Image (tube, grey):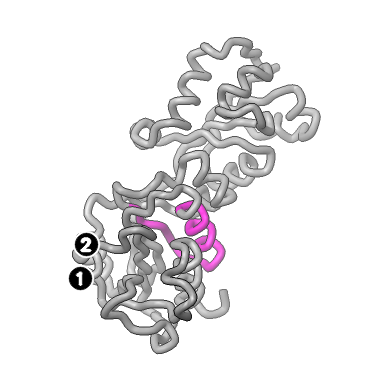
């Protein structure tokens, strides 16, 4: 039988809230908090589940919660509101261990790399696209929003639990490592770049697509570390595309054929 938590100041609740709020704490703990009757079971397919918090209403909607495993706690509505950070919630919260990312870079792999993409919605959407198009992992630098923050998790719809997320202290060095493996590194840039329709999407030796922030784009060092720069041809009606839209177009173009 699940234990009952009635206090918002319960140490386990405080710990879960800290996971939701702090990327550094998530990194140190190698754990994250997710919320949702659909999202949590989806993440459980790829991530070890540690703790489950649920309300009576959530259990009524989905009795399968009891089969998720981990430590299980029945929580009152006001406790769920603290975990959610808002009044509206689905009543199911889970603490997961992060998916394994060691030795994730390999010859012939296909990767998405993100530099300074600070909008968690964009990060989550790009992770979802990378999973949809069969990529092998996502590389993020220290300036990116965490793929395991609440907003990014919702945007990725659980994809962050199925792809290795590799944290890079220096993206140019990571690009050099990939190129040494024979993986072609392509930067998304507006200037000194080739139109996408002139670039073959087939890279049997692997490919890494590097996306920068909407406001600043990629750093010169990151672009210089790549084999080439590419751009998506657009009309003069708009200046640029949203980062997640542009990245998704590029990920589709350079996907493995048959995906």
Whether residue 67 sits left or right of residue 138 in the image: it is right
Where residue 167 sits: x, y (%)?
32, 49
Where residue 16 sits: x, y (%)?
49, 25
For marks 2 and 1 on the same chain, the one whose residue lies earlier in the sequence: 2
Where residue 28 sits: x, y (%)?
34, 33
Quadrant occupied by the N terminus: top right
Residue 247 occupies quadrant = bottom left
Figure check: 47 above or below 9 = below
- Magenta-highlighted residues: 123-140
Marks 2 and 1 close (CB-CB < 8 Å): yes
Where residue 32 sits: x, y (%)?
47, 35
Figure check: 67 above or below 181 = above
Query: Residue sitting at 51 percent across and 67 percent down?
Result: 134
Quadrant occupied by the C terminus: bottom right
**Residue at which label 1 appears:** 224
Query: Residue sitting at 39 percent across and 46 percent down?
Result: 145
Within 10 Å of disc 2 (Cα), the crowding (few <14, some 14-19, many 20+) is some
Tag 1's secondary structure? helix
Task: Verify whether residue 198 appears in magenta.
Answer: no
Within 10 Å of disc 1 (Cα), the crowding (few <14, some 14-19, many 20+) is few
> Which mark, by number, is residue 172?
2
């Amino acid at each position: 039988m699940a234990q009952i938590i009635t206090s918002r100041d319960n140490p386990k609740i405080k710990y879960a809230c800290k996971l939701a709020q702090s990327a550094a704490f998530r990194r140190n703990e190698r754990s994250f908090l997710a919320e949702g009757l659909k999202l949590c079971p989806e993440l459980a397919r790829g991530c070890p589940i540690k703790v489950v918090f649920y309300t009576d209403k959530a259990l009524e909607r989905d009795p399968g919660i009891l089969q998720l495993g981990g430590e299980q706690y029945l929580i009152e509505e006001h406790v769920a509101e603290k975990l959610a950070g808002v009044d509206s919630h689905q009543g199911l919260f889970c603490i997961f261990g992060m998916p394994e990312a060691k030795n994730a870079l390999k010859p012939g792999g296909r990767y998405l790399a993100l530099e300074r993409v600070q909008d968690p919605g964009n990060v989550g959407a790009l992770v979802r696209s990378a999973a949809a198009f069969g990529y092998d992992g996502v590389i993020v630098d220290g300036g990116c929003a965490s793929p395991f923050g609440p907003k990014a998790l919702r945007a990725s719809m659980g994809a962050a639990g199925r792809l290795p997320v590799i944290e890079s202290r220096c993206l140019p060095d990571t690009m050099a490592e990939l190129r040494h493996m024979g993986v072609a590194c392509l930067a998304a840039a507006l200037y000194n770049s080739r139109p996408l329709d002139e670039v073959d999407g087939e890279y049997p030796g692997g490919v890494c697509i590097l996306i920068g922030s909407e406001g600043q784009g990629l750093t010169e060092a990151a672009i210089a570390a790549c084999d080439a720069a590419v751009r998506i041809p657009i009309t003069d009606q708009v200046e640029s595309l949203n980062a997640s839209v542009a990245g998704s177009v590029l990920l589709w173009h350079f996907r493995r054929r048959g995906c």
